[in-house]
Amino acid sequence: MGIAIPEVILNDGLGIPVIGLGTYKLKGNDGVSSIQSAIDHGYRLIDTAYNYENEGTVGEAVKRSSVSREELRITSKLPGRYHTYDKAVTTIQESLYRANLDYYDLYLIHWPNPKQDQFVEAWQALIDAKKGGLIRSIGVCNFLPEHIERLEKETGVKPSLNQIELHPFFNQASQRKWHKEHNITLESWSPLARAQDVLQNATIKQIADHHNKSISQTILRWHYQLGAVSIPKSASPARQLENLSIFDFSLDDTEMQLISGLTRPDGRINNQDPAIYEEF
């Protein structure tokens, strides 16, 4: 029996777990086994993307799982090279074929690619795919408030979720405040900062030791108390279980502030500023 994970309700009514599994680089038979293990431990939110080239792996894990499809929340993402309306529609269909799924629970635009100025067109394709039953909830990744405001202004539909870089070295305080005010759920990619020096950080270690928890568990609890959904990636069954075991303790206000205070002006992992960065 897996760990029961609390849910957050998106602005369109879909409930999703507050922690899920990132699957970047999980591929083939080993990837299927890792994702199956995660589902066995209680993960119900599984994150993939067209550009990860593992939608088929995720779909196979879903097929082999003893958990019903209805219990799972599967996310994929539209790449930048397919932002024109017709290409986006075809790509959504191809994403489903790759995974052998009838629908995605969440489908996101992976990056806004503002210099190309086609993200509103892509958003309209997601809106129509949702109307057609191919997607249950639509959102974005790495969008800044001005990008989201334009989506809503030009289509009348705002995202249910925005997946952004968020970790102790880049706490996104202003983004978090804006999203809370506009009732858009935030989801953290690389919540553990891709295990760079954050896992050796003395401040977090002291807090973790106080709670008899690991640094990873302490960081993921920080995300949860910020109100952000996190999607840590792990192929290890033991680490997957550890990452889920964050609901039996809590951080006090001082501890939350100490972790948030680790943020840096240059805290992005790869300097991927959505105002200028583009990914195809």
Image (spheres, rainbow, N blue to C red):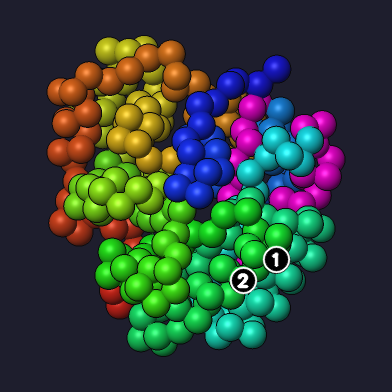
Is residue 153 toward the left or the right of residue 261 in the image? Answer: right
- Residue at 50% across / 67% down in the picture? 109
Q: Which mark is residue 48?
A: none
Residue 245 painted magenta: no
The answer to whether one can see residue 172 in this image is no
Q: Is residue 130 above or below residue 186?
A: below
Location of residue 89 in the rendering, given as x and y in whole percent from the top left corner: 66, 77
Q: Residues within 10 Å of mark 2 (few under 14, many from 20)?
A: some
Location of residue 121 in the rendering, given as x and y in whole percent from the top left corner: 50, 81
- Residue at 71% across / 60% down in the picture? 133
Residue 192 or 124: which is nearer the viewer? 124
Residue 60 or 69: which is nearer the viewer? 69
Which three-letter amino acid code belongs to the residue tagged 1?
Gly
Residue interval drawn in magenta: 41-67
Q: CA distance from mark 2 to mark 1?
A: 6 Å
The answer to whether one can see residue 2 in this image is yes
The image quadrant of residue 98 is bottom right
Residue 43 painted magenta: yes
Q: Are marks 2 and 1 in contact (CB under 8 Å)?
A: yes
Location of residue 234 in the rendering, given as x and y in whole percent from the top left corner: 56, 40
Residue 237 or 231: which is nearer the viewer? 231
Q: Is residue 101 above or below residue 1?
A: below
Residue at the disc numbered 2: 128
Residue at the disc numbered 1: 132
Location of residue 171 in the rendering, given as x and y in whole percent from the top left corner: 25, 46
For the N terminus, the image quarter is: top right
